[in-house]
Amino acid sequence: METNIEHLKQVFHDFEPDLIQDIMDNVIVKEVNSGEIVIRTGQHLSSAMILLNGTLKIYREGDEGSEFFLYFIHPGEACAMSLTCLNHQEKSQVGAIAVEQTTILFIPMAKVNEWIRNYRTWSDFVINTYRLRFEDALLVLDNVAFRGMDERLEFYLKKQVENCGCHDLQINHQTIANDLNSSREVISRLLKKMEQRGILILHRNHIEFLGRNF
């Protein structure tokens, strides 16, 4: 699939024209569907990934298959794990799944390093990617170490609402429990308390948030 150079300029507006053209000439563009797994834990990665459209959810997987939500990757952002694994030839320590129809640009390892040498904006982009993901990791650590499950749930739901830009979240209790490494029963009980406080309304497989309170 081909992508449009004007779209690239719009999403990566800080990049030099020569870098935009270099991206056009060297990347592989792939469309993935909602729910499609893009990276599996333990997978060897052969390319770095940056997003043109859509959203990826990054999660950490436990030894018994449990999942823990870490952060989202949005258009104009890169997958830090793909950059790290390429440079050190390591297996991925996280998984990635498409939240919606998503367009991903796959970049060969040789180009990642070449662009760091040749383009200041790409070097800044890579450094900023690591900084953003480090901040995300600190937020996760703060939530696990210093907040109760009720606070973690509210923080998680706010991140989900911010990501979709909506107040009607298509998500079920089991998915939330998986992302927070909790049980469905605990999540359902806490959501019911939030409903009683007038923060949200629970429906079957979706949650309606009341904007004045959330």
Image (cartoon, helix red, strand yellow):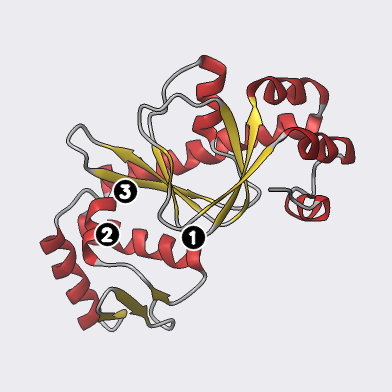
Query: Marks 2 and 3, how far apart in space?
Result: 15 Å
Looking at the rendered image, the disc whose residue lies closer to the viewer, 2 or 1, is 1
Going from the N terminus, do you reach mark 3 or mark 1 first? 1
Going from the N terminus, do you reach mark 2 or mark 3 first? 3
Q: Name the residue tied to disc 3.
A: 143
- Which element carries disc 3, helix, strand or loop? helix
Question: Of the numbered discs in the image, which one, if any, rests on residue 100?
Answer: 1
112 to the left or right of 19? left
Measuring 18% from the left and 76% from the top, which residue is drawn there?
A: 192
Query: Marks 3 and 1, how far apart in space?
Result: 26 Å
Mark 2, other Cα within 10 Å: few <14 / some 14–19 / many ≥20: many
Q: Residue 133, image x and y in percent?
A: 50, 39
Q: What residue type is labelled 1?
A: Glu
Q: Name the residue tied to disc 2.
A: 176
The quadrant of the rendering that contains the C terminus is bottom left
> Which one is in front, 164 or 145?
164
Would you identify the image quadrant in which residue 195 lies? bottom left
Mark 3, other Cα within 10 Å: few <14 / some 14–19 / many ≥20: some
Question: Residue placed farthest to the top in the image?
Answer: 88
- Evaluate if marks 2 and 3 touch, with contact meaning CB atoms under 8 Å apart: no
Question: Of the numbered discs in the image, which one, if any, rests on residue 131?
Answer: none
Q: Residue 82, image x and y in percent?
A: 53, 30
Q: Residue 156, image x and y in percent?
A: 35, 59
- Which element carries disc 2, helix, strand or loop? helix
